[in-house]
Image: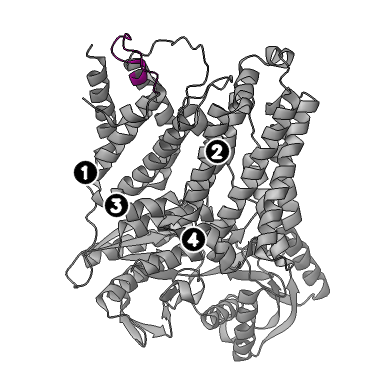
Amino acid sequence: MAPDGLKVAPTDRRSSTPWPHPALRSREFVLAILLAGLVLVAGVLEPRFVAPKAQWLLAGHAWELAIVALPMLLIVVTGGIDLSVGSTLALSAVVLGLSHERGAPPALAAALAVGVGGALGATNGWFVARLKVHPLIVTLATMAAFRGVAEGVSLARPISGYPDSLLWWSQGTILGVPVPGLVFAGLAVATAFVLRRTLVGLWLVAIGTEETAARFSGIPVARVKQGLYAACGACCGLAAVLLVARNNTAKADLGTGLELEAITAVVLGGASIEGGRGNVLGLVLGLALIHETREFVGWHWKQNELNLIVIGALLVGTVLLERLIGRTRRPRPEPVAASG
Amino acid sequence: MKTAPFALAVGLAVLSLVGCGEKAAAPGAKEGAAKKIVVCLLPKKKGVPYFTSCSEGAMEAAKELGNVELIYDGPTSGDAADAVKLIDQWTAQGVDVIAVSPNDPDVLAPAMKRAREAGIKVITWDADAAPDTREFLVNQATPEEIGNSLVDAMAKDLGGDAAKGEVAIVTASLTAANQNEWIKFMKARLPKYPGLNLVATKPSNEDQKLAFSVTQDLMKAYPGLKGVFAISSVAFPGAAEAIKQAGKTGEVVVTGLSTPNDMRSYVEQGVVKSVILWNTKDLGYLTVFAARALVDGDLKAGATTLMAGRLGEKAVVGDNVMLGGTIAFTKENIGQYDF
């Protein structure tokens, strides 16, 4: 038996480990099985669903969520959370729309959106890192505040009509791959690299595992957090540019509920909500599973409402399956089990 | 030792539970009148009585035609982004026709264009979008019909051809495009009833409270006021409430466009004698017939008529398929309608 998931599992090979190999008991493996099973079932029931053309088209619905989920993963790894991502996206989008309306060239408007997103994230970071307010409380407050400002400055009206150079960010392709997909791929590789191969990655895990200890070992905890929340905001700004380009409209209600979807994907991907554990591969598989399940359920049963129960069922299903595989609590000398 | 295969089996079992249950929809084959086609009907918002009523007519048409598989789905939140996802999904499925009632034409435009690029016929119904995003609009009523129906209903409520008295209009805002079109045709129709005298047109800015106070002011300023046209969905109940609270039920009548459910209590109390609306079931019915005719090639640029089952021959004006005809909900018939 050589399941698809094997090649993507963590690669610490110890010849003496009992079967099933720990890799087979990992969250990534479970997700890969579920994903493969879903694609199999979907391919039998709805052959058109698995066609590359359909998949590329439907993937367009997931890029913004995927891009926001990456920094969310890093924040969760530090033991934090950011509930304001949807509102940050909305306010960035409104800034893009308003500056475009006032004659800013598309590149400048997009840069402003990313910049404002970063500034909003930095605000979160300042409260979390410097004033040491719990991120749940900070971002719960800014979630409401940013959305309110977005509605206020735009008067809740849609701002439409962007030039092709902006729409390209969502509708263009390079070598057949949609631009947002490339943006996500680049960010995902960068995130995995930071988490797995850099000192900052070690710091993030250390902060999430035991913050006080991290501080005493000389890790610049406040600076790291400040930068992390700012980066998250900037990613929201980037996602806003892509979303506005996709819908050709900036509106204050964009990204509603995005925070919960992003956190769900992070948790489904195997990250611990208490911090210290999480990896990009798991997140990508989790995102893919959520996306494919949602699209398939909508496709097959043609009832939009069913989507509401899908994510809950997925979370429960994954945990159950993991139990069934007999996952024992693995000792984790190195808390990150990331690859790629 | 057998845990992993077991787990695999469980995983697949879980997924097949998710997967099975309903037959896979056959992707509709193009061309040929006998071939079954898939028509997707997208409302602005799923689950609201107005659109449910439209969908009933659409289902009736699909059943009658026999060669149309109808999919009625839409965002329960009324969120345009969700509507986009549905359009994309239908595009990927390769359905034959997507009929859109756009809740936000700008947001939906890129998705509608993607669908057209994929060779799917896209039409709008109930509300229109940019002309390059769709081939036809199934138009429920022209401004002229609406204007005429409103004036005729007012005249009928005030005693028929011999109706006498001062009337006023409470509109949405003075710049509202739809309302201004209607007002234009109302003014053209009013001379048919020489006893009716239009004394004022006041804005209510889509604000029910403002409509309430504007109507109060009108009744004070024009003691001979007999009728109010309240021609926005929020102005209508606002004006009706003002008349009711002034104790002028029966003395001053108000009419406008709305759904039966929204105005039912005022109709039953006698504050409102007629509520005007197009026939929502017929709108859904005609949309499905238009979709079928579009695939069959019977409805194409330059066509002037469309045969639509029990509705008979309907006019096609430019790229508009005209439903035409309005119904007046009155105390006598409102009980038959539930939307």
Kindly identify which residue carries mark 1.
A44
- Mark 4 is surrounded, within 10 Å at the Cα level, by few (under 14), some (14 to 19) or many (20 or more) other residues, namely some
For discs 1 and 3, the disc positioned in front in the rendered view: 3
Kindly identify which residue carries mark 3.
A51
**Reading the chain from its start, which is encountered first: label 3 or label 2?**
3
Alpha-carbon span between mark 3 and mark 4: 19 Å
Amino acid type, residue under disc 1 in the picture:
Val
Amino acid type, residue under disc 4 in the picture:
Gln
**Residue A190 circle label:** 2
**Reading the chain from its start, which is encountered first: label 1 or label 3?**
1
What x and y, as percent, mark residue B223? 79, 75
Alpha-carbon span between mark 3 and mark 2: 29 Å
User: Which type of secondary structure does the marked residue at label 3 adopt?
Assistant: loop
Kindly identify which residue carries mark 4.
A171
In this picture, residue B51 sits left or right of residue B8: right
Label 3 in the same subunit as label 4: yes
Amino acid type, residue under disc 3 in the picture:
Ala
What x and y, as percent, mark residue B299? 32, 80
**Reading the chain from its start, which is encountered first: label 1 or label 2?**
1
Q: How many marks?
A: 4
What range is drawn magenta here?
A: A11-24
Alpha-carbon span between mark 4 and mark 2: 23 Å
The residue marked by circle 2 belongs to what chain? Answer: A
